[in-house]
Image (spheres, coloured by chain):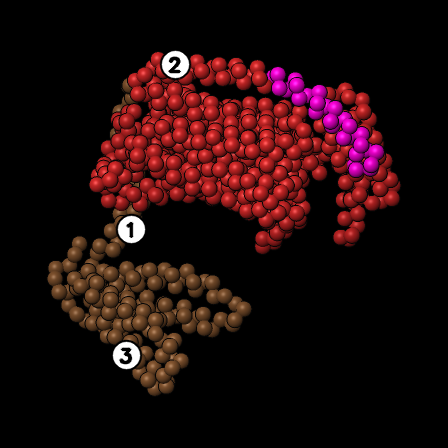
Amino acid sequence: MSIAEAAKHEWEEQHQHPLGFKTRRGLNWFTVGLMYAMFYMCRYNFRFAGAGMRAEFGWSTGDIANLAAWFSVAYGTGQLLNGLFCDRIGGRASMLIGAIGSILVNVLIGFSPWTSTFAAFAAMWMVNGYIQAAGTPGMVKINAAWFNKEERGLFSGIFGFMIQSGQAMISMLAPWILAGFSFLAFAVGPGEWRMLFSIPPIFLGLVAVWFYFVSAESPDDAGFPHGTIQDDVDNSAGTTVPVLESFKFVFSNPLVWFYAVAYGCTGAVRHAADQLSPLYFEDVLGFNMKTNLPLIASFTLVLVPIVAVCGSVLSGWASDRFFRGNRYPVAMVLYYGEACVIAAATTVMALGIIGPTTGGILLGCLFLVLIAITANSTHSIVGAAAPVDIGGKKMAGFASGVIDSFQYYGAAIGLVITGLMLDVSLPGNYTVWFGIMTCFAFFGGCAMLSLLLRQRGNPLASRAVIAFMALLVLGGAIVGVREYRRMKPLALDHYVTAAALAFQEGRMNDAIDDAQRVLRLFPDQADAREIVNTFHDEFVAAARAALAAGDAPSAIENAQNAINLKGRESDARALLAEAKALNKAQEQTIQE
Amino acid sequence: MTTTPHVHTPIPRQLWIKDRCLAVETQFRKSTGRGAFVARFLPLVAVLALTYWNSLQAPPPVTAWIATPVAVVATYLALLVLSHRFHDLGKSGANLLQIVLPVFIWLWVGGDLMAKLPPRLWIATAAVLAAWPVIVLLRLCFQPAAQAPKT
């Protein structure tokens, strides 16, 4: 018998369940997973509402990005606190509270006119971020009670699928809502972004009702005998513990911190790859992502979630079957594999092979797909399976909260560093993007290596790896700061010249892009400031002229362009309001 | 670690769901006598015939979409009842082959026969192939259980 067959045989012998259990667990998992996917619908709806909000309230693109960032901060912090309370009140209660809160906040945004101020909207959206963070600990905690240690890897793979399906659902629903629709006597016109906050909560509400009636906290609650699932941490009956007990156990458990550090690295790579890939397509591969998406870009964007799910499921299954439910060996291999893939991408990028040529595009897209497989595989086994292994059914909520919060903090650190370095890079050069991701992936691998050595009874070697990691951070910071200082004047010279040239040649968009980039690096740069001011004044004048001529759509467009240039400093906000009032009056006249 | 011991008494709704799940896992293990088989199988065949008739009645641009799930559910239930009766007779494989094989044979060679043979011959062949499963189904309606029913 081969090793694989023996492992399979042993695994099957150990996982005999009573009759009806697998079906009941499948139903429970489906219900909990569907609920979690619906949470995503009430969170990713914001992505699609951005353009509408910008147009209606005169917010700049930076404002929208800030809202997303504030949401992430609230979400990360919410994971920590809600995880703790989740262990006290149970996973079902946690998910239901999260669902009710998210429904209320979304409906409030959808129907309330006072969310038009930036501060009010930011506050509401942060509340949504905080309350949504009750979902993950709740889901992880419920499933902790339903799966043995050697079954959780596969469960965590399916968790990855649920995330992707929630995103896919809102991606399909949002264009349909924004295109306008009618339902019985209820008609909604096109472009009504508020409906994006009113319709998804209906789905979440319906699934929450189903969840309330069908889901069970544990097999004991569902009528199966106690001991159907063996919990390695605490196999006594019940799934809840006092807050203090959970806090002490999880905070004093070193495993949590190893996984949290590694998960921070996953967050840095995953979010950097997800959020900056559209810019990479445009800047490096020369695609037009706004109006004419090339086939290979569409193909890559479709392939990424599919391979991400396959990677998650495979890595989870492998850790179950061949590593007896231990996640760190698989995670370590994945992190180092990821580091190798991204290091190869960095080298190829630095050599100038990736670019707007056939071979360059294929290679560029292939690297993105490979990064997606490795990043999402670690995302599932470290983020969903490891917390359950650590906390068991009673403390998985807080363990998940701590580990998952690091993903968002890691993402914030990674994105800030990448943004700073990309700002001082020359056009089309994304070497630093790949380079920074390589460092994070390698760092995650080191965290897992350190854990591996510790678990194998070699604490000295484990500490040596930790010391090496500390040196790595120090070295990275010194090299990074030095490189930033070296690149900044070069980039400044390049973009000032490019902006001036584009301005002289009348290439407005290029001139604005380059000038704004210069202002990000050096806010007082006179030439760039003058270019931005000139175009801003031109847009304001055009908006005024259009308003005087009664052309409301043109006035709105020009006023919006002016606001996008100078943000809140712009005096075009009053013009925008005036143009919108005119537009509304004209529409009413046409209807009458 | 100190935790307060809990005694779990599942609520009736959860026990009801558990019973449904048990039924899903054991549904193909039961057996059905001839009377129950007739009472369950014939209405399902009638429903299937109705859905087919409905699809014939619908004009070309209209899809008979309501009929599709009805047909799917009726087919599933018919297979379930059939398997229970097979268990009752104790010859599941032989009976299933006698019902399924003629259908496969016709799907395999029917087109060729219709194209190459005169109508009299291919209609006769089709009739024989159709009669065989019908005879088996009729036998299922009348034949008493050959052994103690499976549980």
Which residue in the structure is indicated by mark 1? B24
Give coordinates of residue A81: x percent, y percent.
46, 23
Which residue in the structure is indicated by mark 3? B128
Residue B38 quadrant = bottom left
Q: Chain of mark 1?
A: B
Magenta residues (range): A481-508
Q: Amino acid at mark 2?
A: Arg
Quarter of the picture containing the N terminus of chain B is top left
* Label 3 CA crowd tier, 10 Å (few <14, some 14–19, many 20+): few
Mark in front: 2 vs 1: 2
Q: Main secondary structure of the magenta part?
A: helix
Residue B77 quadrant = bottom left
| Chain B on-screen colour | brown
| Chain A on-screen colour | red
Helix, strand or loop for disc 1 = helix
Give the numbered dot on residue A463: 2
Mark in front: 3 vs 1: 3
Sequence-wise first label, 3 or 1: 1
B115 on left or right of A64: left
Give the alpha-carbon distance from disc 2 to disc 3, as whole Å.
Answer: 81 Å
- Tell me which residue sits at (44%, 70%) in the image: B54
- Tell me which residue sits at (39%, 43%) in the image: A30
Mark in front: 2 vs 3: 2
Residue A42 appears in the rendering = no
- Tell me which residue sits at (34%, 86%) in the image: B120
For this rendering, which residue is in front, A393 or A334? A334
Q: Amino acid at mark 1?
A: Val
Question: Contact (CB < 8 A) between labels 3 and 1?
Answer: no
